Amino acid sequence: MKQSVRSLLTVATTTLVGTSSIRNVAADEYTHRYKAGDKVDLWVNKVGPYANPQEAYEYYILPYCAPDTIHHPDTEGGGQFNKLKSHSIGERLGGHALRHSGHDLVYPSDTTIGETGVLETCTTKPLDDAQAKLFTTAANDQWFYQMYVDDLPVWGMVGEMLPDLDAAKAEHFGSDLSHLEEAVARHEAMGGALKPYVYTKRTLQVSYNKERIIKVDLTSDPASLSEVKPGAVFKFELDIQWTKTSEEFHSRFDRYLDHAFFKHQIHWFSIFNSFMMVLFLMGLVALILLRTLRKDYARYALSHGRRDVEMASGGADDDDDAEDDVDENGKPLLDDGARAASHGMTGVEDSGWKQVHGDVFRAPRFLPLLAAILGTGWQLVTLVMGVVLFAVAGPLHGEVHEERGEVLHAILVFYSLSSIVAGYASGSYFKLYFATTPAGRAKGGAGDGSGTSQWQLTMALTVVLLPTVLGVVLSFLNFIALVYGTIYYIPFLVMLKLFFLWIFVSVPLCILGTLIGRHTKLG
């Protein structure tokens, strides 16, 4: 059921945003099912400072070497090494740029006993000054890298800033550097300088259950730390180990969630109790307002009605009128001053909301702009509610945190579909107040087709207001990302797809909503 709903949602979303593409990789990566002997892709995503995750670069900006496998660039065809994975719009907007690592992962047999491991190595050429500077910067700024195996992310540190490790190993700290922190603390206390080191051996442990990959862990061996300096030659090793597990596939992403937050159960009774309390208070306030308005309307109607009767009959019995000037509780509708004013056939003095009714129901100065802003606000409200409901319905189509860019994909879909809400809200609001403008009063309101230029202006502002603001901000940020060479930039092809999505889906729906709001009878 979940797979079918997810497939239908993926097909509909892909069709809407025009991101369909031919997958040139094995289908197992998308079904998350493998057989013995199947290739499992290890993707590298990004590197960047641990303290600033928004500053990220492509993995191979660092002078890592290609593994000695069939994917090595020196082999015929070069294999899949460093080839960019096909991405959806949501993945590209999320700053993902996955490239093939070149490592060979082969899914083990279910009958394998114990652990199976493969050690893949590669040796770099002597580092030049620029390459040594890159590794030094990565170690000094505590850069981390990110990899993906079957959509499961793993992270590791590039290197460390440490004292002379040869001297530390010569002391009682041991060759395994298990007491490295003590050595670093002593070195810093003595005021010694730190040197850049890079991890050269990593262990990738993949846990599987039958035909599913359940868990991926990556560890770096402290004993493999090698000093970075021009002319140094590094031998990088990746130890790939496969381990059986009894954990289930549906819970494999639980370890990535914030357990301090998700361990608390939702108290639905308290939420329902608070909701009912809010409804009760809102009803109480509404009741008070209705009673006040009802009394005001009755008072004004009584005053004007009595004036009309007295003008027609030439007078009336004050005692009988006094008996009628009460509400259902026997309280007088008019005070002494208002009753005297009504007997003298003068207007009742305005009070309360009546004093500002002329300002409340008067058209604003920039009616088309205000209508467009109101429509955009309703569109954003609809967008947020749609995305929240989509996330809440995760058990039906798959949890949103299990797929890269799925939330951004949903935002694009709901933004496009909610354009009709923006058009309707702006159109109906403009129709409501256009009749109170001088042009509307002169031409009999907007219902007869007058004020065409104002309608067109309202429609155009509703269509371009939010996209223009977002386009300017994103263009500025995109320019900065391109200048600094980070992966958080939007490629031109993605921008073109977004433009087509807006022009062929969002704009027609917004125009349709505006026309519906214009011709809807209000009141």
Image (cartoon, rainbow, N blue to C red):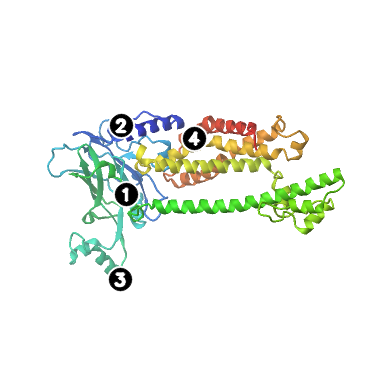
- Tag 4–tag 2 contact (CB < 8 Å): no
Front-most of residues 78 and 427: 427
Three-letter residue code for mark 1? Tyr
- Tag 3–tag 2 contact (CB < 8 Å): no
The local crowd at label 3, few if under 14, some if 14 to 19, many if 20 or more residues have their Cα within 10 Å, is few
- Secondary structure beneath dot 4 equals helix
Residue hosting label 4: 498
Q: Residue furthest right?
A: 314
Identify the mark nearer the N-term, 3 or 4.
3
Q: Is residue 248 visible?
A: yes
Please report the residue visible at 65 percent of the width from the left and 42 percent of the height from the top: 369
User: Where is residue 383 drawn, in percent x and y?
Assistant: 50, 41
- Secondary structure beneath dot 2 equals loop
Q: Quadrant of residue 402?
A: top left
User: Where is residue 217 drawn, in percent x and y?
Assistant: 25, 48
Q: Is residue 237 visible?
A: no
